[in-house]
Amino acid sequence: MGRILTERDIESAVRGGSVYAAGGGGWADHGRMLGAAALRLGKPELVAIDELDPDAIIATAAAIGAPAGTTAWEMQGIDYVKAAKLLAEALGQPIAGFMVGQNGRSSTLNGWLPAVALGAKVVDAVGDIRAHPTGDMGSIGLAGSPEPTIQTAVGGNRAENRYIELVVRGATAKVSPILRTASDMSGGFIASCRAPVKASYVATHAALGGISLALTLGEAIIAAEPNGGTAVIDAVCRTAGGAILAAGVVTAKSVIYTKEAFDIGTITVGAGAQAATLHVMNEYMAVEDADGRRLATFPDVITTLDASGEPLSVGQVTVGMQVAVLHVPKSVIPIGAGVLDASVYPPVERAMGIEIARYALSA
């Protein structure tokens, strides 16, 4: 049976989503705003995919951009609703449920407000359990499809006349870069609604139960907090199925914002033989030891935590800060079809200058 999402669930979704954000995944306060707006408007209901008609239309509610805080973005709750309405109008039929492309600080809650506004359900499914840099990675296997689809984007910095509304049709891989360009033009962060498919497709291609995973993790974090940072980190590791891969002082950071709306670079934790290098493309995509050996690679969950157990975004990490690097191997999380699609990796590997696909696609 479905679960009515409550005020308590907002904080659990933000806190658990912040771990799965893997250094990206939006803004915690933005997530709280989305959840609160949804609850003011109605009663968002989280349902498993098998609770919906197999032919019902499910769309992905998402935010596109670089969340490290280097740009003057503006995105309001109404932008998610308008993006969903534009998609429904273009599609010519109602949307029964909204899933999200990834978990994250705010992205775990991206479907709540449009679901309430359009009388739909919040679907307990995600394109990817953790946050990722490109929409194709969360596109549940549609990135390489020649079939035309519809994607919408809404939002922008109003004071700078950057507000944009966009409806595009075409093959996913061809139109996704258009939305990323719109994100950059809007100020760096924009609401989108895309990839309308039947529930039966979601059932076989999405990472099912992804919202519940974030909620459960968030509940464990909140319960552990009165016992201090070590207890929180232990709870995160135990609940998420991970371990601390490296810990130490941040000794170097080189991350730049690109015109493609990506934050790309590296962060180094520790020094000498104990140093670990985190490779960033909006999120943490790989970790290497001091000898260049790969320790973790997307779609593993890779997250920096401070001494209190608070997950830190790439933008929050500064040189001199003490951090622990959480690693949750891909073997313990549901994997969506977008992550297993070889076509999504070449653009990321080119931008980062490292190998990802060989690790991501291996057993």
Image (cartoon, rainbow, N blue to C red):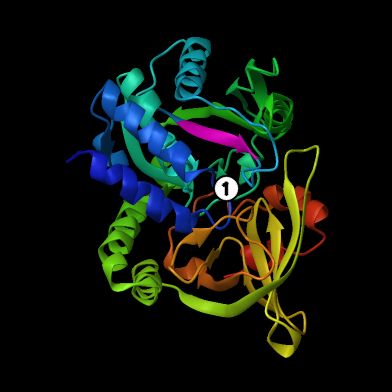
Q: Could you say which is closer to the camera, residue 273 or residue 308?
A: 308
- Is residue 208 among the parts visible in the rendering? no
* Quadrant of the snapshot with the C terminus: bottom right
Q: Could you say which is closer to the camera, residue 52 or residue 13?
A: 13
Instruction: Tell me which residue sits at (70%, 33%) in the image.
Output: 180
Is 98 placed above or below 24 here? above
Quarter residue 74 falls in: top right
Q: Is residue 238 magenta?
A: no
Q: Residue furthest left?
A: 1
Quarter residue 117 falls in: top left
Instruction: Tell me which residue sits at (68%, 30%) in the image.
Output: 183
Judged from the image, the secondary structure of the residue bearing numbered disc 1 is: loop
Badge count: 1
Instruction: Tell me which residue sits at (29%, 21%) in the image.
Output: 41
Q: Could you say which is closer to the camera, residue 90 or residue 250?
A: 250
Q: Which x, y percent locates residue 34?
A: 40, 32
Q: Which x, y percent locates residue 360?
A: 63, 63
Position of residue 23 in the picture relative to residue 240 (left or right)? right
Q: Which x, y percent locates residue 176?
A: 68, 32
Which span is picked out in magenta? 60-65
* Quadrant of the snapshot with the N terminus: top left
Q: Which residue is mark 1?
A: 338
Q: Residues within 10 Å of mark 1 (few under 14, many from 20)?
A: many
Q: Main secondary structure of the magenta part?
A: strand
Residue type at mark 1 is Gly
Position of residue 300 in the picture relative to residue 334 (left or right)? right
- Is residue 231 among the parts visible in the rendering? yes
Q: Which x, y percent locates residue 55?
A: 36, 27
Is 223 placed above or below 149 here? below
Instruction: Tell me which residue sits at (70%, 37%) in the image.
Output: 71
